[in-house]
Image: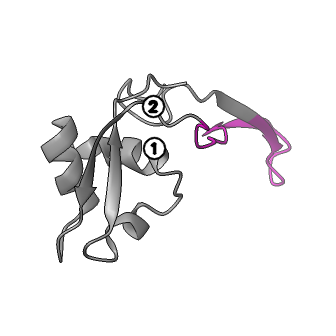
Amino acid sequence: MNDPASRYHAVAVLTLPVVDPSTGEVREIRYTGRRFIPIESGTLLVEHTVAKGERLDHIAARHLGDPTQFWRIADAAAVIAPEELVRQPGSRVPITLPQPNR
């Protein structure tokens, strides 16, 4: 089970049966399924201008009140690597209303 605030909360936990070659016994490996970036980005609240040395968790803390929610900003901008958003000082990062986990 993933934490309700996690980006993986709504992603299914899957199992894979594996045969142990030394004993012949079957055991299950549990893993979190694949997560896709949502297509809809939500309602734009503000565009944040990135300052030199700024990190996405700082931006999330400022605008969303929780630094661990940086992934919501990355999802809204449709980027896989969150560091892309703060690489270039002066770039604009969209801050949207948080969307419910899917």
Q: Which one is nearer the viewer's eye here, 15 or 90?
A: 90
Image quarter hosting the C terminus: top right
Give the amino acid at mark 2.
Gly
Left or right for 72, reference 80: left
Q: Which one is nearer the viewer's eye here, 86 or 13?
A: 86
Mark 2 crowdedness (10 Å alpha carbons): few <14, some 14-19, many ≥20? some
Determine the CA span between mark 2 and mark 1: 7 Å
Residue located at (38% from left, 64% from top): 85
- Residue 39 image offset from top left, x and y in percent: 61, 38
Residue located at (18% from left, 75% from top): 53
Left or right for 9, reference 85: right
Q: Which one is nearer the viewer's eye here, 5 or 63?
A: 63
Q: Is residue 37 magenta?
A: yes
Q: Would you place residue 70 above or below residue 97 in this image?
A: below
Q: Which residues are magenta?
A: 16-39
Left or right for 48, reference 88: left
Q: Secondary structure at mark 1?
A: helix
Mark drawn on residue 42: 2
- Number of marks in the image? 2
Q: Secondary structure at mark 2?
A: loop
- Residue 19 image offset from top left, x and y in percent: 83, 44
Q: Which one is nearer the viewer's eye here, 48 or 102?
A: 48
Q: Is residue 66 magenta?
A: no
Q: Pointers 2 and 1 in contact (CB under 8 A)?
A: yes
